[in-house]
Amino acid sequence: MSLTTPRPRVLDPLDLLGLDDELTGDERLIRDTVRDFVGKRVLPQIAAWFEAGTFHKELALELGELGLLGMHLEGYGCAGASATAYGLACRELEAADSGLRSFVSVQGSLAMFPIRAYGSDEQKATWLPRMARGEAIGCFGLTEWDFGSDPIGMRTTALRDVNDYVINGSKAWITNGGIADVAIVWAHVDPQPGTPATGSDVRGFVIPTATPGFRTQNIERKMSLRASVTSELIFEDCRVPVDAMLPGVSGMRGPLSCLSEARYGIVWGALGAARACYEVALDYAKTRVQWGKPIAAFQLTQNKLVDMALELQKGQLLASKLGRLKDAGELLPQHVSLGKLNNVREALAICREARTILGASGITLEYPIVRHMNNLESVLTYEGTSEIHTLIVGQAITGHAAFT
Ligand code: TGC
Ligand code: FAD
């Protein structure tokens, strides 16, 4: 006989299995704090920001005040939160907009994480406290115009000149680039002409964006992630001292390990965007009347809603499991690929299905669905495309690398 109090036998349409009931008190507090923040500060304005194509930089300070920047890191003003808490924050931020979660992912996982994990004491002390407070904004430059999924071939170089490195090249599609104070930039160091690039000479540099020879150019006319800044970083004889190099890592493991951190956040974040679309579609279906009854009463609409709710729960189970693995130090990059592949793919499918339930209304910015849908097109591509994550998992289960 069970001694626990039976739960009321009513399904929560947004959480059929009651998965959030398993959260700790601290995790619920983080969930509710972020939900409250985006509800008051972001949701009332996000459609206008998206339409105007602007990111409001002052949000950085507010996110810092909430302790969300680098929240899964220890020390230097970072909150040291659990992987699950970090995931929940990403989920609730992305329920508002993927651009907001992108900002937090890049700041915490792509810019602060490499400094925390591989930086010198001086780099950590200089940047991490200010970045945690949102006073300094970071970006991460790996991709180049000609090297996206296969970054090893990057052309950006850092050549040693006495006590400096001189950096030349460019990075493309860089989130936060045009508003950043510091860039984590990956480059081949002193490459030998004519030698095939293996990636072993790739090193990371911590570069203040005010350094002479460093400029940025924003990428305009995006139809996705419009409330996020995306830029090109350009280096023309950009001279940095040797101690700008991250001393603790060399080779592709450096940037790829940062990607694992950020991809983990996306596994959770995508669920937020999908949940927001499902919630709107469910409400709409209950009130939109055709043939004299709510469209929610039609079997085909119910079929859509049930599939959406089911995929949301499956995605949440996956994210929760990855969170437990991460906290136990057992999370493999391939686990993260499985999560990113599934949850972004399913989130996009949920948003598209939700859009059909709203009919014509679904295409306007009066509702969040088309915004989330368009945003998720970027999320499907960045941090490793769905094809690349398929190949990573494919290699793990067959033993054959099929990238080339
Ligand atoms: P490979 O030879 O397999 O590995 C090289 C070294 O790296 C290690 N490693 C990882 N470590 C941690 N996490 C991971 N995910 C790792 N993947 C590999 C590996 O163990 C090895 O270490 P070591 O010590 O033995 O040397 O790797 P590869 O260089 O052949 O890479 C293959 C491939 C295709 C998987 C990789 O290039 C890849 O993931 N490509 C996708 C590129 C990508 O995701 N770019 C993202 C750019 S950043 C971005 O999009 C930010 S969006 C920001 C936002 O707004 O949210
Ligand atoms: P490509 O690599 O050219 O791929 C094109 C297509 O070919 C894709 O469908 C891909 O899956 C497929 N493909 C490629 N190789 C294979 C293969 N071996 N087998 C099968 N199919 C394959 N990068 C950063 O470094 N920092 C950032 O902050 C950042 N932010 C971004 C923000 C936005 C809004 C966007 C859209 C991108 C951002 N990126 C960033 C870049 C992003 O990581 C790349 O776009 C992504 O890695 C894919 O590279 P690509 O666009 O060059 O596509």
Image (cartoon, grey):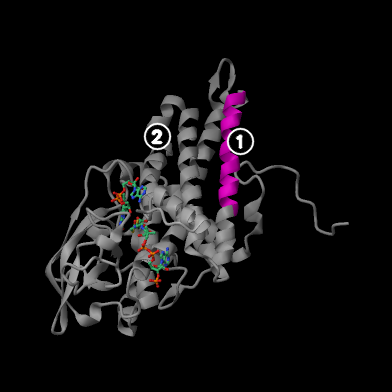
Position of the N terminus, as image quadrant, is: bottom right
Q: What secondary structure prevails in the magenta region?
A: helix
Disc ID at residue 306:
1
Residue 260, placed above or below residue 318:
below
* Residue in the picture at 58% in, 25% down: 300
SS of the residue under disc 1: helix
Instruction: Examine the image and state in which quarter residue 222 appears.
Output: top left
* Residue in the picture at 54% in, 71% down: 329
Name the residue nearer the viewer: 146 or 224.
146
Q: Identify residue for label 2.
A: 366
**Which region shows up in magenta?**
299-317
Are the two marked residues, 1 and 2, in contact with CB atoms closer than 8 angstroms? no
Q: Position of residue 302 (x, y in %)?
A: 60, 29
SS of the residue under disc 2: loop
Residue 187, placed above or below residue 389:
below
- Taking the image as drawn, is residue 217 in sight? yes
Cα distance in 3D space between marks 1 and 2: 24 Å
Q: Position of residue 214 (x, y in %)?
A: 15, 66
Q: Position of residue 179 (x, y in %)?
A: 24, 60
Instruction: Examine the image and state in which quarter residue 119 appears.
Output: bottom left
Q: Position of residue 246 (x, y in %)?
A: 30, 77
Q: Amino acid at mark 2?
A: Glu
Residue 319 in the magenta stretch? The answer is no
Instruction: Examine the image and state in which quarter residue 52 appears.
Output: top left
Residue 311 in the magenta stretch? The answer is yes
Q: Residues within 10 Å of mark 1 (few under 14, many from 20)?
A: some
Relative placement, left or right, of 385 versus 163 is right
Name the residue nearer the viewer: 171 or 134.
171
Name the residue nearer the viewer: 143 or 197.
197
* Residue in the picture at 19% in, 74% down: 190
Name the residue nearer the viewer: 1 or 393.
393
